[in-house]
Image: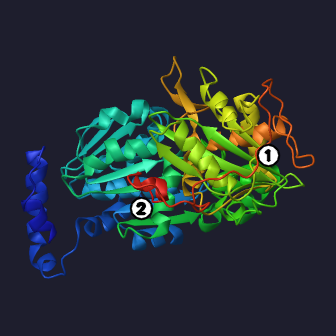
Amino acid sequence: MSEFSKLSQEKYTPDPTKYVSQLGSLIGQFIETEQRPSNSPEQSSQNLLQQLGFLTPHPAQQKMLIQKKRYNVAKCGRRTGKTELGKREAATVALAGYPVAYCEPTYDMLEEVYQDLAFKLEPHIYRKDYGQRIELDTGGVIDFWSFHNGADRIRGRKYKRLVLDECAIVVGFRRIWEKVLRPTLLDYEGDAWFLSTPRRGSGFNELYEYALAGTDTDWACWQFTPYDNPRISDTEIEKMRAEMSAATFATEVMADDEHSESELVYPQFNRAFHIRQPLSWATAAVRVVGIDPGGTDYTAILPVSISKDDRFSTHANYYKADVGIDYYIKVLEDIGQHGSIHGVAVGETGGMTIINTLRTAGYNAFKPRMQRFEGIDYIRMLLEQQRLVIAPECMELIQQMQTYKKKFTTDQDTGDKYATKTPSDHHADLPDALRYAIMGYVKGDVLRPQGGQVTIQHDSSVGKAADTRPGVVQKLFPKQDKGKPRWLAGARR
């Protein structure tokens, strides 16, 4: 569509005088422009952007612009030019006559972006509301929003493009994207740019990994550092490397999320290091089962073995909702078929009913003696030292280790949300069962077998060793329970 055709179809013309003048100018160019190949609204804005003072994209930015799709996720170190790209992409669509939203974590972070766009777009500004909105004579609009209170103020809007800057530090960003931001793109079939320095466990990183998987052709992703920005001196970057800690440089400059701050309870967990075939259950020095009772919710049962040199392995996970003591005993019998169980660590609250029933059934059941943080710190140490192996068959445990996050709270003065040190109870059932089993051994609730017997450290008279017991004939790695949500079987959520 030519400039003349596009302008003649404009529905929003706030300044009639300027509109008539602009239309007359375009009529004079009609014969020439109408014969040229039709361009998209964005393509027709590029020369104008240069005239208005927007920087020419450097090679890394050009690569993104060439390869971009509907949803674009750029994991960038400092000074890579991500905000400059974001401003350019916002202006491109606004100059073509469409509404755009530019979002940052706080309004303070938005101020410089607003001022720069207001300065560059001044020749085409029809009206502006300082720090919040710029309206152009083309009919385009740029709204500026913070993610304060879950970005609820954006609900009900409609946009052709979203530019989401530094969104990795936004609490609950994945939820905000799905519930608030994505619906704003429906009317115009709009697109989005996600631009941020990474943070482990963030919603931004989840979207980056989703795009990286390549299963959805609407998504694209890139990773860039300031070395990719020709406007930044490599010598200066090397000076910064010498002045920073290795971890800070890796995160802030090289966009390496492995060294970044994390919302995750177990950021040390790494699929490449920790998911391997476990040591033999039958020949292990100690065999413990952790149980996190769920009642009508999901119950988690996890067998953990310990080698003579204190290396820990998981072998299977049992995860099922609305089960009782009969199910616990059935699973323990199944596990016992492959090697006697030396202890059963039960995270029971509000009594000892389950523990006493399991003791009566002949198992060394006990309540782990430890503080929550103590157990979490110990598992973090095992992960760092690569002394904990999780079997590939433990799909639900793997999923929960990757999604188990810290609890967030709200600052009473500013209203900002931030991560606390306290873990959330959401998606924690199997990690809790793992913690019970490991700490039961570490705390001495289950000691190494002596002459085929096990001594336990609880005060019950029921303390007989668990030996092989007749049980149901099942495989140690059971099939997925029917009716279980698909994501529990390892599917992406």
**Residue 274 location (% of width, % of height):** 70, 59
Left or right of residue 321: residue 241: right
Left or right relative to 217: residue 278: right
At numbered mark 2, what does the secondary structure look like: helix, strand or loop?
Answer: strand
Q: Quadrant of the C terminus?
A: bottom left
Is residue 168 at least partly visible in the picture? Answer: yes
- Say what secondary structure mark 1 lies in: helix
* Pointers 2 and 1 in contact (C-beta within 8 Å): no
Please provide percent x and percent y for residue 230: 60, 67
**Where residue 63 sits: x, y (%)?**
47, 72
| Quadrant where the N terminus is found in the figure | bottom left
Task: Judge whether residue 55 can be spotted in this image.
Answer: no
The label on residue 72 is 2
Residue placed under numbered mark 1 in the picture: 381
Compare residues 453 and 440 and report the one nearer the observer.
453
How dense is the environment of label 2, judged by Cα within 10 Å: few (below 14), some, or many (20 and up)? Answer: many
Q: Residue drawn 10% across and 73% down?
A: 30
> What is the total number of numbered labels drawn onto the structure image?
2
